[in-house]
Amino acid sequence: MFSFFLKGGFLMWPILLCSVISITIILERFYHLHRVRINIPGFLSQIKELLVRDKRDEALRLCQETSGPLGRIFSLGIIQNHKRTLSEQEKILSRAGSKEIRDLEKHLRGLAIIGNITPLLGLLGTVVGMIRAFMKIQELGGRVDANVLAGGIWEALLTTAAGLSVAIPTLVAYHYFEGRVDDYAAGMKDAASELLEFFNKD
């Protein structure tokens, strides 16, 4: 298998490196997004129920014990509730939400870059391999066995296959994570808006 890998040429190494980085990012993002997963409507209901019963400290403790962005944003919202105007509260929570979303999107750009460059690396490897194959044909004065030519071509195509094998699952993972982050961000925004409305209702 390793000798098969080496036949693809030196560009197989950066493709291999990209695959290792991609797998690392995918596993890390799966773990991180699993940890922050939460039943947003249920959590919001719990907080509102505690606040209605004037148990502000318990609500704050629940937020602080809840891992993930929503717990931190709600903690901030409860702390700032009596100290700021509605407009100020909205700005503070908006900035905090933007920071949390950036954290959820961490490393996703790396996946996008890998998904885009690995097919190009593979294509470059194939082009380099084809150039070498035709240079060999020229050296032999055009008298070359068809089996030798076919062998040179399939070896050159190995890098394209390797690049696509890395790029396809990487891009699938990128769009999956992007969708998860968008859904979480939308739910977080709606929940924060409901909390502000609760604090500022007449």
Image (tube, grey):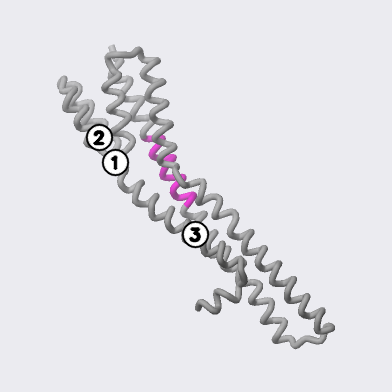
Pointers 2 and 1 in contact (C-beta within 8 Å): yes
Residue in the image at 70% along x and 68% along y: 128
Camera-nearest residue between 57 and 185: 57
Q: How busy is the neighbourhood of tag 2: few (under 14 within 10 Å), some, or many (20 plus)?
A: some
Q: Amino acid at mark 2?
A: Phe
Position in image of residue 103 (x %, y %): 41, 39
Mark 1 is surrounded, within 10 Å at the Cα level, by few (under 14), some (14 to 19) or many (20 or more) other residues, namely some
Q: Residues within 10 Å of mark 3 (few under 14, many from 20)?
A: some
Q: Which residue is mark 1?
A: 38
Residue 55, position as x, y percentages in the image: 15, 23
Q: Earlier in the sequence, mark 2 or mark 1?
A: 1
Q: Position of residue 198 (x, y in %)?
A: 28, 20
Residue at 37% x, 30% y is 190
Residue beneath the point at 57% across and 75% down: 6
Q: Position of residue 93 (x, y in %)?
A: 37, 25
User: What is the three-letter code of the residue carrying label 1?
Assistant: Ile
Residue 169 marker: 3
Q: In this figure, what is the number of numbered marks?
A: 3
Residue 142 vs 52, above or below: the answer is below
* Chain part drawn in magenta: 174-187
Q: Residue at x 82, y 79 (%)?
A: 138
Q: CA distance from mark 2 to mark 3?
A: 34 Å
In the figure, is residue 113 to the left or right of 44? right
Badge 2 vs badge 3, beta-carbon distance below 8 Å: no
User: N-terminal of the two: label 2 or label 3?
Assistant: 2
Q: Quick check: 61 above or below 82?
A: below
Which element carries disc 1, helix, strand or loop?
Answer: loop
Could you tell whether 70 is left or right of 133 in the image? left
Gap between marks 1 and 3, in whole Å? 26 Å
Asked whether residue 77 is drawn in magenta, I would say no
Task: Classify mark 2: helix, strand or loop.
Answer: helix
Residue 43's label in the rendered image is 2
